[in-house]
Amino acid sequence: MDVDEFYRRTRGSLQKAREYLKDEDTVITFLYMFKKDESFAVLKASMESEEWDAAFRAAHTLKGICLTLGMTCMYDSASALTSELKAGRTKEALRLFRDLEELYRITIKEIDMVG
C-alpha cells in the first residue's frame, strides 16, 4: 500500500505530515520510527498501574508525535485522553485509553502494509 492509502485508511492527513516532514520518503521513515517509539508502551503501563502523572506525560508525548505525523484520528484521541488525565477524570481517561489503544493497534497494522 502507498502512503496516500495509509492516510486514507487511518483517517489521517498526509498534507499535515508533509507540513512538518516535507516529503513522502521522510513521512514513511517516520511512520516506521513510530512503530519503535516507546510512548504508547509507557502510556499503557502507566494507565494499567494508575500512575496518572506518567500517563499524562506519555499521552502528551504521543499526541505531539501524532500531530507531526498527521495521524489526525489518533491525535484527536490522544488529545482527549490528555485533557481527561489533566483534569483528574480517571474513569473517563480509562475509557478513552481503550479507544486510543484500538486506534494504535489498527495504525500499527496499517504501517506494516506501507511500502
Image (cartoon, grey):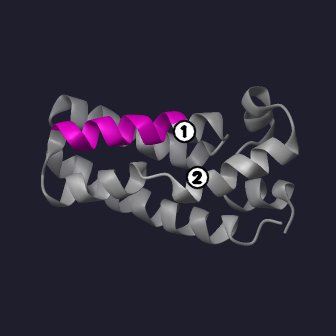
Q: Which mark is residue 110?
A: none
SS assignment for the magenta stretch, majority: helix
In terms of image quadrants, where is residue 95? bottom left
* Image coordinates for residue 84, horizontal then vertical, percent: 26, 37
| 73 to the left or right of 113 | left
Q: CA distance from mark 2 to mark 1?
A: 8 Å
Q: Is residue 56 magenta?
A: yes
The residue drawn where x is 40% and y is 54% is: 40
Return the residue at label 2. Answer: 34
* Image coordinates for residue 8, horizontal then vertical, percent: 77, 56
* Image coordinates for residue 49, horizontal then vertical, percent: 13, 57
| Residues tagged 2 and 1 counted as in contact (Cβ below 8 A) | yes
The residue drawn where x is 85% and y is 54% is: 4
What is the secondary structure assignment of the residue under circle 1? helix
What is the secondary structure assignment of the residue under circle 2? helix
Q: Is residue 24 magenta?
A: no
Q: Residues within 10 Å of mark 1 (few under 14, many from 20)?
A: some
The answer to whether any part of residue 11 appears in the image is no
Q: What's under tag 1, amino acid-wise?
A: Ile
Which quadrant does the C terminus fall into? bottom right
The number of numbered badges drawn on the structure is 2
* Residue 60 or residue 74, whichever sits in front: 60
| 33 to the left or right of 47 | right
**37 w.r.t. 85: above or below:** below
The answer to whether any part of residue 65 appears in the image is yes
Return the residue at label 1. Answer: 65
The residue drawn where x is 50% and y is 41% is: 76
The residue drawn where x is 74% and y is 50% is: 29
Q: What's under tag 2, amino acid-wise?
A: Phe
What stretch of residues is rendered in magenta?
Answer: 53-64
Instruction: Say whether disc 2 or disc 1 marks the residue closer to the N-terminus.
Output: 2
